[in-house]
Amino acid sequence: MKNFRAFTDDNGFNLPVIDAPDYIDYRVLGAAAAETHTVPAGAKVCVVIPNADCYIKASAATTPAADVTDGTGQMYCPAGAARVFPCATGSRYISAGGFSIISAVACIVALEFYE
């Protein structure tokens, strides 16, 4: 598993580019059916890239059906956008052990892991 590394230009500005991963998993989700994914040993960062909107959480993820006003909502991952999460014990979204992911529609989610 590669280390997570971002790139900078000659002036030191961060570029929207990361190193290509060598550990990639996929989840094929059914509509409104949460799945749990186990974080591989040694992973410290996960990049989540869904082809449809989805939600993730360290505990059971659900698609929002009502207002959440107490800070316990899921992390929203919009279709086609990469979201970077730490794989850390105590993380609200992706814990060192695993996480839950759900989408209102059937979709495929790429999970790229880095040390």
Image (cartoon, helix red, strand yellow):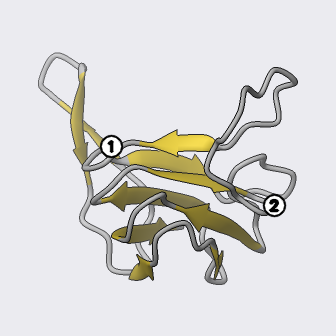
Q: Is residue 105 above or below residue 70?
A: below
Residues at circles 2 and 1 in contact by the CB criterion of under 8 Å: no
Q: Which amino acid is tagged 2? A: Ser
Query: In which quadrant is the N terminus drawn?
Result: bottom left
Residue at position x 27%, y 60% from top? 51
The residue closer to the viewer here, 53 or 89, is 53
Q: Secondary structure at mark 1?
A: strand
Residue 26 percent coordinates (x, y): 39, 80
Residue tagged 1? 6
**Along the viewing direction, whichever of 12 and 81 lies nearer the viewer:** 81
Mark whose residue sits in front, 2 or 1: 2
Q: CA distance from mark 2 to mark 1?
A: 29 Å
Identify residue for label 2: 59
- Residue at 32% x, 70% y is 21
The label number, if any, that marks residue 62 in the structure image: none
- Looking at the rendered structure, the kind of residue marked 1 is Ala
Q: Earlier in the sequence, mark 2 or mark 1?
A: 1
Rate crowding at label 1 as few (under 14), some (14 to 19) or many (20 or more) other CA atoms within 10 Å. few
